[in-house]
Image (cartoon, rainbow, N blue to C red):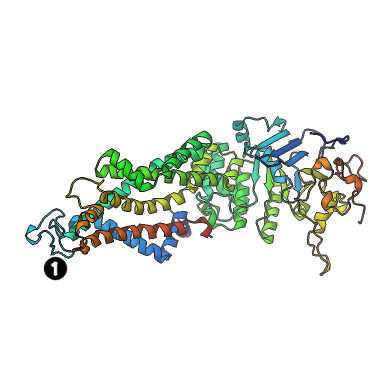
Amino acid sequence: MSLSGAEAQETVLTQSEEARGGLVRDAFRRLRRSPQAIVGATLVLLFVLVAVFAPLLAPYSPTAQDLSQVRPGQFPGPSAEHLLGLDQLGRDELSRIIYGARYSLIIGVVSVTIGATVGMALGLLAGAFGGWVDGLVMRAADIMLAVPSLLLAIGIAALLGRSITSVMIAIGVVNIPVFARLLRGAMLSQRESDYALASRSLGVTKGRVVLKHVFPNSLAPVIVQATLALATAITEAAGLAFLGLGSPDPSIPEWGRMLAETNAYLASEPLLALWPGLAIVISVLGFYLLGEALREALDPKLRR
Amino acid sequence: MTAPGTTVADAVPGAGAGTPLLEVRDLRVTFSSRGRRPVKAVDGVSLDVAAGSTVGIVGESGSGKSVTSLAALGLLGKRGVSISGSVRFDGEDLLGMPEAELRALRGREIAMVFQDPMSSLNPVLSVGRQITEILERHRGLKGQDARDRAAELLVSVGIGDAVRRLKSYPHQLSGGMRQRVMIAMALACEPRLLIADEPTTALDVTISAQILELLRELVVGSQTALVLITHDLGVVAGLCDQVHVMYSGRIVESAPRRPLFADPQHPYTTGLLASVPRLDQARGVPLLPIPGSPSDTLPWAEGCAFAPRCSRQVPECLGAPPALLPARGAAGGPHLVRCVNPVQDGS
């Protein structure tokens, strides 16, 4: 199909107009204007890049030991060869921190995916059907939320045995009631919205109203929560590892385990505890800042 | 539930010859929630809407005008709501109709336009998608056919550049544009009855005039009957054949447009008229608001609900509810009023 010049121009205009439109783009535009979002996104990006390119970035293998320099109670600090020094087993601290990002990222993403998927499925059921389904799901969520989340995670992780998988499942399960509640609440309020009534008044079936109208409009808080949950998942994973519920394999460079292992040398070598702590703080801060900025960007009240 | 002293039956407003398109008889809607007194939102409303005609329902907030239409379409929730009476559309009872049948009727035969176009469109779907959804549902139109028809509809409601507008999201459109889109959606299947619930309240004056003009063009004189729900008598003045004034769940005055404005007889109607600002009034003449608020009502069982706010209250107003009767000077005519001491000429 050939277009005349004017028509072609018209098409271009249409596309650029469309490019400016759309809710996602709208939110994205607002994110770009927020310094908080920029800082958060930069930190998250840094974290993800470090995790993905760990083998390229790390100067040494995370398990390689240089025992010639390490004696009990005496660790060489930062040097030109080992920028962050060596840990208690003579391994390069920087390389371990860099590889540790991989574990934090995987644990965070997998556990939040578990929590969000199952939680949203339950929330969708409760929000769509209401009645006894809603009652059942929400009472179960209440019971789970009544137990402090770290305690619940400890319980589940202990039950499943020490491994990275059980940490991921434990943190995922802890997140389920949060997502279920959030989606269900958002759907309940969106069900009462004018556009839901308007589409019902025009004969759209109830199932369609719920799935096509109510559900997509209820997703914004879930997206925000997923970002924030990533931050919590990283701290919780570190917490579980610190408490000895992570993988029993001592070679795994997990930030929480690194904190726990250097605990004994805190008085003589505080720096060894500082590095993994800092890594946790920076990655968590990144997700928090991004999550909060997303909350603002997706807030329909702020949209013109 | 009949109050003592009710001996005279209400006349049915708007009743004419032949079967009306919409026939509402003694519709009652009561909202009850635990621990609170049940609220009679609609308390025995009867009215007829003839095919192709335009009917206005006027009243303050809380007078039951919106609830009447929502109840008729089965759009009120089930919990805590009890509905009685009958609503017939083209002879078929809507209140007893199974939900699936009713749903097939909504949007195809009866459509509604709501008050706030800002919130009545789904913010995450493009305008085109929302219109084609209706076409798909009722007309089985899909893909390009549906989009073509949607573009036609947008043109018919005065939206230029329709093909491009189909891709717009609601937040990219002005309030007036959104209301035009709502009207396009409502008229997508050429329904026989369009209920417009305060269609211009959320819009500014010039846009509101445009929307009313659009409704007039599209609906008045067409096969589609229009029920216009509003609190603004000015809106009704230009558009409606028959006007029902509601107060506290009941119709208090009902008349064709001309008699209503020329010879309003219920004190509430005159109050509404006096509280509308007029250009031809001398400056400095204060508007006359109706004193009190709709919460200062009497239950109809104890007399006229409007009595506590009425300047023409007489002892007969209390005790028994007044019936809706042919108005003075309109023997047997379509002008009805529910008042024991109606307004005289010029007062």
Is residue B132 toward the left or the right of residue B331 in the image?
Answer: left
Letter of the chain that mark 1 sits on in the rendering:
A
The foreground one among A211 and A268 is: A268
Residue at 15 percent across and 66 percent down: it is A77
Q: Residue placed at 84% from the left, 54% from the top? A: B270
- In the rendered image, residue B147, in percent from the top left (x then y), is placed at 52, 45
Regarding residue B148, the answer to whether it shows in the image is: no
Residue B319 vertical position relative to residue A32 in the rendered view, above or below: above
Q: Amino acid at mark 1?
A: Ala
Residue, far left: A68
- Which residue is drawn at the image coordinates 61% and 32% (left, top)? B99
Question: Residue B284 appears in which quarter of the rendering?
Answer: bottom right
Query: From what the image shows, is residue B214 above or below residue B100?
Result: below
In front here: B304 or B284?
Answer: B304
- Give percent across and percent down for residue A215: 48, 44
- The number of callouts visible is 1
Q: Name the quarter where the N terminus of chain B is drawn.
A: top right
Q: Which residue is mark 1?
A: A80
Could you tell me residue B328's position as x and y percent?
92, 45
